Amino acid sequence: MSDFDWSDIEEMTISLELEDGSTLECEVIYIFEWNGDDYAALTPVDETIEEIYFFGIEADTKGGQPEITLLQIEDEEMLDAISDAFDEMLDEEEFGEDEDEDDEEDGRWDEFINKKLD
């Protein structure tokens, strides 16, 4: 995993250019490491679109301001594996927490993710 603090870009809004030339505003909802590489889960800001997109991410920290690059994942099998790993991480977070720590913010996060994954 990179030495860059990825939490700085969670909840950041990113414009994705689609194949038809249009743009889609997405929010970075989760940054995670899988098999030694960094990935970002993005979801459209428009809540009527219930999709999650996965990208590899890199940060170039040379110079002043870090430059973050999204890397498209072309291999369908790898994309499926990353999606499965993401689902497992969410399951571990959901079931690995102490039931007494029923935080309102966590409840909203779980509701949002479950809505996006359904």
Image (cartoon, helix red, strand yellow):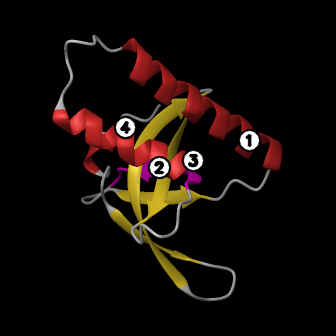
- Given residues 90 and 99, the one toward you in this image is 99
Disc nearer the start of the sequence (4/1): 1
* Proximity of marks 3 and 2: CB atoms separated by less than 8 Å: yes
Query: How far is disc 2 from disc 1 in space, using C-alphas?
Result: 19 Å
Disc nearer the start of the sequence (2/4): 4
**Which one is closest to the eye, mark 2 or mark 1?**
2
Location of mark 4 (residue): 110
Quarter of the image holding residue 25?
bottom left
- Label 2 sits on what residue type? Lys
Residue 49 in the image: state x and y as whole percent.
52, 68
- Given residues 13 and 1, the one toward you in this image is 13
Location of mark 2 (residue): 115
Q: For numbered disc 3, what is the local secondary structure? A: loop
Disc nearer the start of the sequence (2/1): 1
Disc nearer the start of the sequence (4/3): 4
Disc nearer the start of the sequence (3/1): 1
Residue 91 horizontal side relative to residue 18, left or right: left
Location of mark 1 (residue): 80
Location of mark 3 (residue): 118
